[in-house]
Amino acid sequence: MTVEDSVSYNVIIRGFGLNGFEEEALMVFNRMVGLGFSPCSFAVKSALQSSAELRYFREGMSIHGYVLRNGLVPETSVCNSLISMYAKWGRIDIAEKVFDNMGERDLVSWNAMISGFCQNGFGTEALGVFVSMKREKTWVFNEVTLLGLVQACGLSRNLDSGASLHAHLTGLGFLSNVWIKTSIMDMYAKCSRVDYATKVFEELHDKSLVSWNSLIAGYCQNGYEIEALELFHLMLQDTYLRPDCITMANVLPAYIGLGDLQLGQCIHGFIIKQGFDLNSDFVLATVIIDMYAKCLDIESGFELFMILDNPTLASWNAMIFGFVLNCQASDGLRLFNQMLQSGHMPDSVTVTAILQACSVLGSSRLGLSIHSFILRRNSMALSLCVSNALLDMYVKWGRLEIAKVLFNNMHEKNCVSYNTIIFGNAKVGLPIETFELFNEMRYENQHEQASIAIIGVLQACARSGDLRLGESIHTQVLKCGFQCDNFVTNSLMDMYAKCGSFNSAHHLFNQFGPVRETSSWNVMIAACGIHGYGKEACHLMENAENDGYVPDSITFVNLLSACSHSGLIKEGCKYFRIMIEKYGIHPSSEHLGCMVDMFSRAGKVEEAYEMMMEIGERLKLESAWGALLGGCRMNGKVEVGEIASEKLSRLAPQHCGYYALLSNTYAMAGRWDEVAKVRGVIGEMGLVKKPGFSTVKI
């Protein structure tokens, strides 16, 4: 049929959009505009909605430009579609600008903005929109508004507002809506008030399987594994209800979270007693295999797998992943070969598991072979999941150049792709490259994990000491609104400390106010240690304890290191005892290494040796003995150095650095014959010392 007028085009575009033919709707829209016809607001809405569904960022931006050029901005319905489109893409900032510039808003506009903020995790902002909405003289609301508000309270963990909204909804009689009541349960669970969620559940007159499943999931989300199981057992008492696959999927994480193998075996027995035939219900069989694997009983999982007459591909995949998870990557590869022989063609999940096995084994030859296997199957080579697994494998092997080629040739990229290559560059200290990749990631509308990506950029700046670029990244953090992310702020503090700007790190730390996580205290204590402020580190530790924070193993590593670099032997010994006696933390290699280094810097190698003989000898800690050998070189203690070297020759016979330390210890004492012998051993073993390097950014 030949289309010759704008009315026909508008009808066709709208028809395609309403029936889910997004590609066709956009194609006709572009043709219509290209021929000079003017689409109506309904056609523009359909084109925007199609761009949103297909996630065609550039196409949607182009249509937005057309709207601006042709004066369609005053159209409320068009603006509503723009808001929804940008919100779906994660560009809530642009959606908010469209909303703010609207001349007239209707209920759909307000609902779109509230829902948009909720979609992107901004519960507080969604509630703010509702407050503004209430200021309108003719404001109204509907059930969509209420659902959005309940979700916003859950996302913002705003229990007070959520409870008030619950009471208001009760008075208005909206609780007859099952979706609203289920959302209220979910809201309370997100606010860590499972007791309130339980009360709402108990008020339900007709408790469906969906409501039981929802509350069980809420318990698991909050770490109430035992309560989740009790609720599950209570559900079983209802003779009209029979657990389905969703029920089991919600319950099994509780067993995994408890890490109790016996409970896992009980659920296995329950499934059998319920009459589930695992030979026909492969979903349940696969879930049980996965449970055994995650409870580190791979043998039981394998026994179940072996009794299956005709395992599905999902069952093979679960078993292969289980072997990899249980540090039996070789067994996983053997099972993969058996799977191929059984006639199953691997899918992207299978290959992802195999690539993880190759990463664990560190076998370049095997990994390259699997890569070739993938390339021979064109459809698999185009899989985003497989491409990301390949990318991760090469990054973990340190083959960054190959990873870059693979990344550049990927047909499709997502946030996982960008984060993998960003952290690969960060690992070797390439801040410019990481920043460029981050900007590309944002341009390509990969905003889902942008806060994680920017942490990689900050790590690269910290490794390279590039303060100027780090400050630029800080500006980007503020523009993107990531300053509320505790992990991002901690990374900023770490970057400033390692780039020499202690005051900037301390300023960020103070911005946390009275609410700080243990990780933030850890970063600030480490910053004090880097800059030689040992007393300040001890003062921070006292403040943390006074505020009720419980230090962890990392806290004491940072604190002991700070004491070591500041010569605070008395304080270091005190906190070492506190760590063991008060907090029950067993000394690790890092803790002992710090103590040995602290004694060595003070010339007390004998005390360091006594500590190693008392604790380190029992734990066989390589790095701590290495620190002792370094202290012997520093103080010229040849006899103790020989003992430490003898320990290390058994613990790490291929570590060239320890032989070099022993050689330098002999050299400090003028024992050149021994120096020659050690260097001869290094040559005979074919060991090569990796050269060190340092950089200074001006």
Image (cartoon, rainbow, N blue to C red):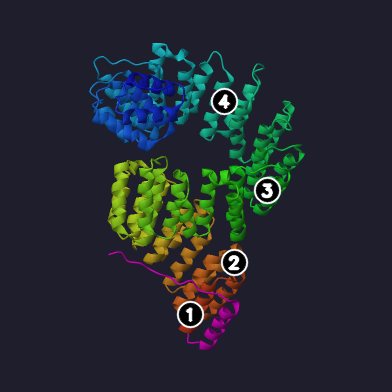
**Residue drawn at point x = 40 percent, y = 48 percent:** 453
Would you call the spot at circle 4 few (<14 residues within 10 Å), some (14-19), or many (20 or more)? many
Frontmost residue, 448 versus 654: 448
Which numbered marker is on residue 336?
3
Q: Secondary structure at mark 2?
A: helix
Which residue position is annotated with label 1?
664
Foreground mark, 4 or 3, reads: 3
Residue 416 against residue 175 in the figure, above or below: below
Which numbered marker is on residue 213?
4
| Residue 157 seen | no
**Residue drawn at point x = 60 percent, y = 32 percent:** 249
Q: Is residue 685 magenta?
A: yes
Would you call the spot at circle 3 few (<14 residues within 10 Å), some (14-19), or many (20 or more)? many
Q: Secondary structure at mark 1?
A: helix
Foreground mark, 3 or 2, reads: 3
Q: Tell me which amino acid carries mark 1.
A: Asn
Which numbered marker is on residue 321?
none
Q: Which residues are magenta?
A: 669-698
Which residue position is annotated with label 2?
617
Between the C-alphas of marks 2 and 4, the distance is 52 Å
Would you call the spot at circle 1 few (<14 residues within 10 Å), some (14-19), or many (20 or more)? many
Position in image of residue 91 (x %, y %): 35, 36
